[in-house]
Image (cartoon, helix red, strand yellow):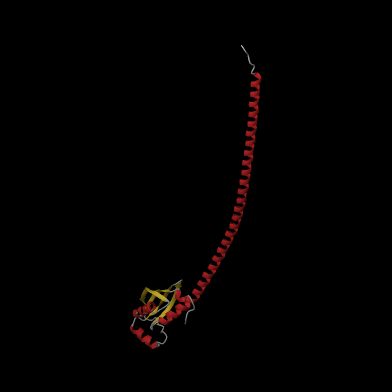
Amino acid sequence: MIFINLMPHRHRRLEVRRRRFAIGLGISVLAACVAVLAASFTLERLHAQQSARNAILEQAQVSMAKQEAQVRQLQAEIAVLQQRQATASSLQLQRNLPVALLNEVTRLAPPGLALTALRQNDLKVAISGTAASNERVSDLMGRLQNESTVLYEAELVEMRSAAPAKPVRPAAGVPAGAVEAEGATERMVEFTLTVMMRREAVGGETRP
């Protein structure tokens, strides 16, 4: 029987395998290191880009905050100007309302009627007075309703008989004797009526 010693050959094959394993392991470690470095570099680059974007967004937010503050300031200034304009318009209107009211009432008041009080609440006006008869009051209401460009919606609130001795103030152009004669046969009445004033009709200067 022939015996062949294979020990050296097996030993060499084992060494070759060990070297190949070491080389493969080294390559794998090197590849892993390269992959880790590449991933780290990529993450750093992405982080830098995101940081740059965040910085741009923060600058934009600061700029928008400044613009919003400016807008709020402008809105506050506009509100103040609008308030001043409204106040000026209200004062102008309040100055013109009494003049327009007196002009219209004295122009449209019929003879035999005297006014005793005018009470104004914004655009609503209460007119009180005395008249020689109910027809005088109806005549005044009809004139205020149909002939006035400033007043409208004349409504009678109250009308009652007055004392006979209460004098009637004659209207312009009416002789006092005519009123006295008429008052002797017609009983005096006291009345209160309300009218509304047109805001657009007295917005500007009132004509006499």
Residue 115 location (% of width, % of height)? 42, 79
Residue nearest the viewer, comparing 11 with 146: 11
Residue nearest the viewer, comparing 66 with 186: 66
Give the residue furthest to the front: 2
- Residue 162 seen in render: no
Residue nearest the viewer, comparing 83 with 106: 83
Where residue 7 sits, quadrant-wise, is: top right
Give the residue furthest to the left: 185
Residue pictured at 37% horizontal, 87% vertical: 178
Total of numbered circles in the picture?
Answer: 0
99 displayed left or right of 64: left
Residue pictured at 60% horizontal, 57% vertical: 63
Quadrant that contains the N terminus = top right
Residue 169 location (% of width, % of height)? 41, 83
- Residue 200 seen in render: yes
Residue 16 location (% of width, % of height)? 65, 26
Residue pictured at 64% horizontal, 34% vertical: 27
Residue pictured at 38% horizontal, 88% vertical: 177
Residue nearest the viewer, comparing 140 with 36: 36
Residue 154 location (% of width, % of height)? 38, 74
Where residue 74 sits, quadrant-wise, is: bottom right
